[in-house]
Amino acid sequence: MNWKVMMAIFQKEMLELLRDRRTMISMVVVPLFAMPAIFGVMGKFIQSREKEASGEAMIVGVDASRAGAAAAALRAAGFELRSESGLRAAVENKAVAAGVEADAAAGGMRYRILVDRTRQASAIAGEKIRAVLEKLKDDTVRSSLHGSGVPESVLTPFSVDTVNVASQKKMGGFLLGSSLGYLVILLMFTGAMYPAVDTAAGEKERRTLEALLCSPAPRNAIVLGKVLACATASFLTALLAMASMVYSYRHTPFAAVLGADMRLDLLDPSTFGLVVLSVLPIAMLAASLMVAVSLFAKSYKEGQSYLTPLLMVVVFPAVLGMLPGTELTPALALIPIFNVCQIVKEIFLGSFSTAAFAVAFAANLTYASVAFFAATRIFRTESVLFRV
Amino acid sequence: MIQATGLVKRFADRKRGAVVALDGVSFEARGGEIFGLLGPNGAGKTTMLRVLATILRPTGGTATIGGADVVREPERVRGLIGFTSGDMGQYGRLTPRESLEFFARLNGLEGARLKSRVGEVMDRFGISEYAAAKIDKLSTGMKQKVAIARTVVHDPPVLILDEPSSGLDVPSARMIEEFIVSAKKSGKCVLLSTHIMEEAEYLCDRIGVVNHGKLMAVGTMEELRQSTGKQRLREVFLALLGLSPNGQEATA
Ligand SMILES: Nc1ncnc2c1ncn2[C@@H]1O[C@H](COP(=O)(O)OP(=O)(O)OP(=O)(O)O)[C@@H](O)[C@H]1O
Ligand SMILES: [Mg+2]
C-alpha cells in the first residue's frame, strides 16, 4: 500500500464530500435534527396523554336517576358528571369521555362503563371509572361486614405488588439502547450512502475516473482512500447523532416527562467510548459495501437506486434486535448489525458480555474487510468500470 | 517511446456479442514526434489510447511505453504518461490548484517540489488568476487549460491525447495546438487521436489511419497523398478507409 497516495486520495475525497450539499445534509442536518425531533414528539405524546387524562377524561356521562351511590363516589373522585339521556351517543360523539349505565338487576346493581377504545381519553376514563367502582364495591362489602364480627382481613387475604428492580440508569439505557441505538446504526448507513454514490458512481458520471485510473495511484490505495472517506462520513454521522441524542435526552419535553432522576449521565466516558468503539467497524462495513455496490452504477441516480434496497436489508437484523428478550450469545454475535444493536443496548444497560463484544467486533471487522476486498476486486474489473 | 505490436481488444457486449475494437494494431512513435490516429467514429481510437494508457487490458498483443510493458508494469507506464481526452470531466468542487496538487501527489511529488511544479504549470497555462475558484464555475476554455495542466503536472515524457480539441472554440483549440507543438519541441512523444483531417495534417509528423480496429496505412501526409494518388484531404482519407468518395465500401 502506498500510504502517501492513499492519504492524497482520502483528503481529496473529504474535500469533495464537505463541499457536497447532499452529503452534508445526510451527515450533519439529519442526525442533528432527527434526534431532537424524535424526542420532542415522544415527550409531546406523553405530555398530551397526561393532559387528556386530567382534562377531557374526567368528564363522564351518567344516567342521573339511577346512578345513586356510584355518582357520589365518582364525584368524590373528581369526575365531572353530566346527565345524558343517550349515553352511547354521547360517548360516540365525544360529548363525554365515557358513560356509566346502571341497572337494578336481580343480584344488585349492575354498572356498565361505556368507552370508545379508539380514543385515548375515553380509554383512560374507563380505567379510572373502573377503579372507582371497584373501590366502591370494596367499601360496600366493608361496611356490611362491619359489626358482623367477621374481620376485615378476609377481604384482603394477601396483597400483590410488582417492584421494578431496574435502576434508573438501566431504565434509561433500556429506552435509549433498544430503539435509539439502532437508529444510530441506520443513520450510519444513510450517512455513508451519499458519499459512496458520489465517490464511485459519481466519478463515472462526471467522467473523472479515467484520469485517476491512468495515474500511478495503486488501485487498492484508491479504493481505501475512498472507503475511508465514506467511513469517516458514516462515523461523523454516528457521533453527531449520539451527541444530539444526549442533548435531546436532557433538554426536550421528553426529559421533563422522565423527571430529573431519569436523566442519566450518558456522557460517562466509558459508556460513550465503548459505544463508539463498537460502531467503528460498522462505519467501515457500511462504507465498503456501499462503495462496492455503487461502483456498478453508471450514474448518481442509478447508484442511489442500487443502495436504497441495501438500506432495507439493514433494517431486518436491527428489527430482530428490538424484539424484547433477545440476548446476545457469542454465536448470535456473528450476525452483523444485529450484534451491534444488541451490544449498544447492553452497554447502555450497564452490563455486557466481554466475549460477545469481542466476537461482534471481530466479526464486523471481518465483514468490513471482505467487503473492502470485494470493492478492490470490482475496481479492477474493466467490464464494471467501463460498462456501456 | 511507444511501441505497439499486434494489439487486439475484444469487448463482450451484452447486446452485440463480441466486439473487436482493435484487430492487430502495430505501430511505433518516437520522442519528439507527433503521431496521429485518424479514423471515423467507432474505429477504435479511444480503445487504442486506453490500452496504451493501461486503463484497458489488451486481449492480445503487446505494447511498451518507454520500455515498460503496459500489462506487466502498468504502474511504471502510468508514471511516464499524461493522458487526457476531450470528454473527460474534472473535479468541479475542487479549485484548479487543489486539483493540480492532487494529481501531482498521485505522481509522487511532495513538499516544495510539488508547490513549485504546480506554480509553474499554473503560470504557463495562465491559470493562476482563477486558481482559487471552483472548477465548476470556470468557462469551458479555462477548464480545458486546467485539464492540460493536469496532464503535464508531473512532466511526463509521453502524452496521449484523445480528441483533445473536440467541442472547443477556435481560441481554445488553438491553445491546445500550441501546447502540442511545444511538447514536441521539448522532445516529448505525442500520440493524438482525431477525426479532423486538417488537425492531423497541420500537427502530425506521421498519421495512422484506423478503421474497424485495423491500421489501414501509416505515413506522413505527403506519403499518404502519394500512395492514394489523391490531393484533397477528404479523398485521401476515404481512399485509405477503403471507401469510395460517395461513401460506398469499395470492392477490393
Ligand atoms: N466498454 C465497451 N464495451 C463494449 N464495446 C465497446 C466498449 N468500448 C468501446 N466499444 C466498442 O468498440 C468500438 C471502438 O470504439 P472506440 O470508442 O475505441 O472508437 P473511437 O474510434 O474512439 O470512436 P469515436 O470517434 O466515436 O470516439 C466501437 O464499436 C465501440 O462501440
Ligand atoms: Mg473515441
Image: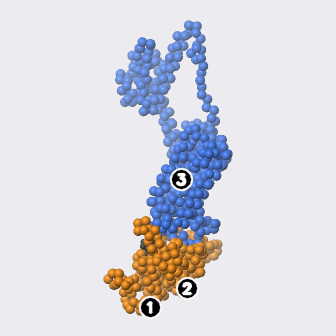
Chain colours: A blue, B orange
Residue at the disc numbered 3: A189
Q: Secondary structure at mark 1?
A: helix
**Real-space Cα distance between discs 2 and 3?**
51 Å
Q: Nearer the viewer, mark 1 or mark 2?
A: 1
How many neighbours does mark 3 have within 10 angstroms: few (below 14), some (14-19), or many (20 or more)? many
Chain of the residue where label 2 is placed in the rendered structure: B
- Please, which residue is most extreme toward the front here? B252
Q: Nearer the viewer, residue B28 or B24?
A: B24
Above/below status of B190 relative to A205:
below
Q: From the top left corner, tell me how far across and down residue B101 is, in percent.
A: 58, 71
Chain of the residue where label 1 is placed in the rendered structure: B
Q: Earlier in the sequence, mark 1 or mark 2?
A: 2
Q: From the top left corner, tell me how far across and down residue B51 is, in percent.
A: 51, 75
Q: Nearer the viewer, residue A363 or B145?
A: A363
Residue at the disc numbered 2: B31
How many neighbours does mark 2 have within 10 angstroms: few (below 14), some (14-19), or many (20 or more)? some
Above/below status of A321 relative to B25:
above
Which residue is at 39% across, 89% downward?
B228
The amino acid on which the numbered mark 1 sits, given as a three-letter code, is Glu
Above/below status of A253 relative to A243:
above
Which residue is at 36% across, 86% downward?
B235
**Real-space Cα distance between discs 1 and 2?**
21 Å
Q: Are marks 1 and 2 on the same chain?
A: yes
Q: From the top left corner, tell me how far across and down residue A186 is, in percent.
A: 53, 50
